[in-house]
Image (tube, helix red, strand yellow):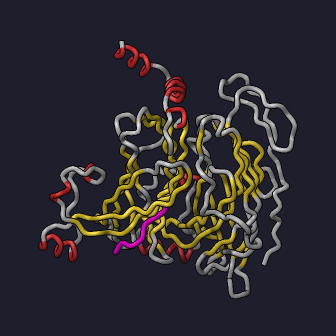
Amino acid sequence: MITTAASWFEKTSLESQVLLLTWAMAEVHVIGQIMGATGFSESSLFCKWGVHTGAAWKLLSGVREGQTQVDTPQIGDMAYWSHPIDLHFATKGLQGWPRLHLQVWSQDSFGRCQLEGYGFCHVPSSPGTHQLDCPTWRPLGSWREQLARAFVGGGPQLLHGDAIYSGADRYRLHTAAGGTVHLELGLLLRHFDRYGVEC
Amino acid sequence: MTISTASTALCTARTGPPQRSEPFERWTLSLGETSTLQGSAQHMFGLRLPLDIPAELQGQQRVRATLLWSADMTSGRTRELGATLGGQGLEEGISQITSKSLDARRALVWNFPIDVTFKSTNPYGWPQIVLSVYGPDVFGNDVVRGYGAVHVPFSPGRHKRTVPMFVPESTSKLQKFTSWFMGRRPEYTDPKVVAQGEGREVTRVRSQGFVTLLFNVVTKDMRKLGYDTGPPDTQGVSGHSPPQGLPT
């Protein structure tokens, strides 16, 4: 019975799906920007970002991941991306609250890209506009790799991106701090009070 | 010092015609008029916008700004009503050309009025204001000095936003010199690209300045539809605001 209901649901149009979901579920809108980054040693930076959610969350509209432009700041040391984020989630539960994970890379004049840091932050849980500062870290290799990185560039990277936002298997990592990514995220919640959730 | 026309007496929101064919279209009640609201509520937000757009653009003497709106209109769920940018009822507007002030502040002030109303059934695709700033270079050609975009705040009240401005940059040094010399710098063919996230992975930009916007936001029926916008923006302009024209 449940499988037929689910398959029936998947066959309905997107508009009807949204109607049914939004009647039954709580919704979260994340509307904001990845403003930029400070504190990195290189100046031409870009950011690859993605949002990871738990199984109870469904992305209704918006792109879940992306990459910003490459910015070379002329004033000060903050690289500005102003990358818009507009996501619409529907959720049945609070587990797996959305997490925004970031990878900051630098690009040199030859077009080569080098990893500058990984970071993640949870999307805020209270409605309104929030200024977030997300610290980053980058994996350190052996002294040989560090020397090579200083002269030639490159350096170790994570094989699986989920180590950025999950805590499992981190004990093997030896990392150094990178700079800070600044975000301005606005959060709109819908129907949370209907389910008795206070935030 | 500019004399501001900061009064928000301009109310250009109007009622829209009924759209009974689509299930999601509804009436909107505009402020100051006495039409009745039919059908179920929807959220609409009206914005009274600054009046004050001071800018700090490094090294620029004279600049003018083009402003336009970018919202998710493609789905048909967001409709714009009664926009006046600069009092002309347009979706986009062009400011005057301003020069740096002669006093110690060296400020660039447009003080450009914006008054726009949107209605929608879904906050996805929340409107953004896209700015393009142009100015003359040393040869007198009109070149782009910066692009920027910012989301309109969604909690009612008064908000101040500082928008960083960036210009696209070419990769090769020869092309940079050629474009500087010929006065044809890289520009976006459609400035609305700045409001989107897709397609920006391959662009190189240079950030070089800021524009400050002041928003007064009014929303309608968001709470009734179940949306919680949170407390008013505490990092916006609160309490007594300084006289218009002073970049804070």
- Magenta span of residues: A35-41
Does the segment drawn in magenta span residue A142? no
Above or below for B75 versus A103: above
At x 56% / y 51%, what residue is drawn? A128
Q: Is residue B44 left or right of residue A113?
A: right
Quadrant of residue A171 within the rendered picture: bottom left
Percent from the top left, x then y, of residue B5?
Answer: 83, 65
Question: What is the quadrant of residue B194 in the picture?
Answer: bottom right
Q: Quadrant of residue B93 in the image?
A: bottom right
- Front residue of B26/B76: it is B26
Residue A36 on the magenta span:
yes
Q: Quadrant of the C terminus of chain B?
A: bottom right
Q: Nearer the viewer, residue A2 or B55?
A: A2
Residue drawn at (52%, 37%) of the image: A192
Asked whether residue B79 is in view, the answer is no
Residue at point 38% right, 18% down?
Answer: A7
Indicate the position of residue B106 as horizontal and vertical percent values.
68, 83
* Residue A199, position as x, y percentages in the image: 50, 45
